[in-house]
Amino acid sequence: MYINEILDNGGITTSFEVFPPKNNAPFEPVLKSVEKLSLLKPDFISVTYGAGGGTSQNTPKIASYIQNELHTPSMAHLTCASSTKEEIDAILSQLRDIGVDNILALRGDLPENYNPDDSNYYRYASQLVERILDFGGFSVGAACYPEGHVESKNTHEDLIHLKEKVDCGAQYLVTQMFFDNSALYSFLYRALKVGIDVPVIAGIMPVMNPNQIKRSCALSGATLPSRFKIMLDKFSDDPVSLQQAGIAYATEQIIDLIANGVNGIHIYTMNKPEVAGAIMNNLSSIL
Ligand code: FAD
């Protein structure tokens, strides 16, 4: 089922992100995680993409398993910075053959010795969006950054490029993680002002590992509100308490988002169904 059609229904949607096994890591634990996640009845599950080698092949496999064995709509992430246009077409054929209907079109991180003028590669995600739609058979989403993408000079310039991505056909947007809802509300207001009117799905990361959150935020530029920092500091040496506090924080964030009319909630599960399950349980009367 196409995600743009699910979103068109207008109700609240919940979805999960998982990552596939890295290189030669076993599939079994990831398959077990997605089985448990699909029992929580999300509207879809997305599978991240690690460019290069065997890792990139693991995304279609997991996405196909979710779609065809678990009968939950799946979305495969796909990045273009380190695959040639020819390689991208081969992956699109593969995804279409295995019945994965939805793609999150991304540029990905720039590889070392990246040459922006090499015409064998798509330079921006907007070009990948165009190619996927031209190829046919997919619903296409793209990434957005409530606090601006790290490489852009300022948030307005980033919004203008985001508008181009939507004009190229991105049917919905999934946000980078954020921990202060006001960053999202401000982004939604500014996005609407420049004419971005597609659904925006809010990406929520329940904190489970303080170092990983600090690393991701340093890389992505997401700000940590002081309330959140205090929680991290207090429980950073106590993983069980931190997980409980992280679940509570994510739950509060989601309740506030839904109360303010944000209908799409995407949980970065880090392949932990127990965390996604606890959040869904906290929201059982709301969803
Ligand atoms: P783009 O939309 O191409 O933007 C990249 C930069 O270029 C931005 O600064 C933008 O403002 C600028 N730009 C765009 N168009 C133009 C233009 N015409 N002229 C000048 N500048 C322009 N990475 C992975 O490797 N695998 C994943 O599975 C993955 N999943 C993700 C899921 C989500 C929800 C998000 C938010 C990010 C994900 N990423 C993933 C990270 C993503 O690949 C990086 O953030 C990457 O640096 C940018 O990708 P993009 O698709 O947003 O790029």
Image (cartoon, helix red, strand yellow):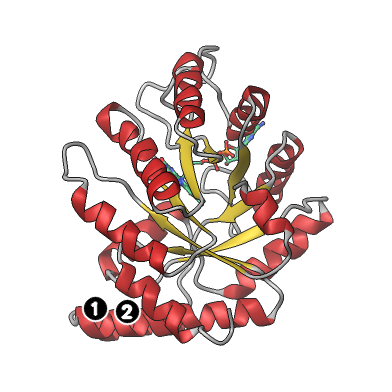
Q: Which mark is residue 232?
A: 2
Q: CA distance from mark 1 to mark 2?
A: 5 Å
Q: Residue 48: tell me if it is visible.
A: no
Of the residues shown, which amino acid type is indicated by label 2?
Leu
Residue beneath the point at 76% across and 37% down = 167
Total marks placed: 2
Residue beneath the point at 47% across and 57% down = 221
Image quadrant occupied by the C terminus = bottom right
Q: In the drawing, does residue 1 fall left or right of residue 204? A: right
Q: Mark 2 falls on what kind of element?
A: helix
Q: In the drawing, does residue 124 fall left or right of residue 277? A: right
**Residue 135 higher or lower than 67, as above or below:** above
Is the C-beta separation of discs 1 and 2 under 8 Å?
A: yes
Q: Which mark is residue 250?
A: none
Among the 4 quarters of the image, the one containing residue 201: bottom right
Residue 77 % position (x, y): 47, 41
Pointer 1: what residue? 236
Residue beneath the point at 23% across and 42% down = 22
Of the residues shown, which amino acid type is indicated by label 1?
Ser
Identify which residue, 145 or 103, lies in the foreground: 103
**Residue 94 higher or lower than 195, as above or below:** above
